[in-house]
Amino acid sequence: MRAAGGKGRGRGAAAARKVAEPVEDYRALSPDQVAARIRQLEARMYKHAQDLEFEDAARLRDQIHKLREQALIG
């Protein structure tokens, strides 16, 4: 239960921790490098999910989708 006037409390701490990640250009990677990168990201995604860090897992899932999409187009 929230205290009066506590609207949005607790959310600022999580938002303050978010840091912009560098955008990778996956089109410059070889097919072997793409596969290795996907394996790395999947391992991290599953670890986040196991630790109940679903937002982080979803962010990595989206990054994997983007990587696969760019690898197919490029």
Image (tube, rainbow, N blue to C red):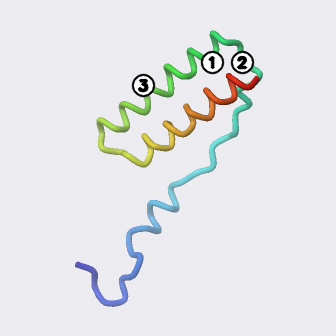
- First reached walking from the N terminus: tag 3 or tag 1: 1
In this rendering, the answer to whether 40 lies above or below 31 is below
Q: Give how far across and how far down residue 28 sits, in percent.
A: 77, 21
Return the residue at label 2.
29
Q: Secondary structure at mark 3?
A: helix
Residue at the image point whose x is 70% and y is 27% from the top:
26
Three-letter code, disc 1: Val
Question: Which mark is on residue 74?
Answer: none
Labels 2 and 3: the sequence-earlier one: 2
User: For the residue carrying disc 3, how many other residues have a C-alpha within 10 Å: few (<14), some (14-19), or many (20+)?
Assistant: some
Q: Is residue 48 left or right of residue 40?
A: left
What residue did someone put label 1 on?
Answer: 34
Type of amino acid at the residue the image marks with label 2: Leu
Marks 2 & 1, CB-CB < 8 Å contact: yes
On the image, which quarter does residue 64 sit in?
Answer: top right
The residue beneath circle 3 is 43
Locate residue 14, reporting x and y percent.
45, 60
Under circle 2, the secondary element is: loop
Q: Give the image location of residue 37, x and y in percent.
A: 57, 21
Give the quadrant of the C terminus.
top right
Q: Quadrant of residue 33?
A: top right
Residue shown at 39%/82% (left/top)? 7
The amino acid type, in three-letter code, at marker 3 is Ala
Q: CA distance from mark 2 to mark 3?
A: 19 Å
Residues packed near mark 1 inside 10 Å, few (<14), some (14 to 19) or many (20 plus)? some
Hey, which residue is sitting farthest front in the picture? 73
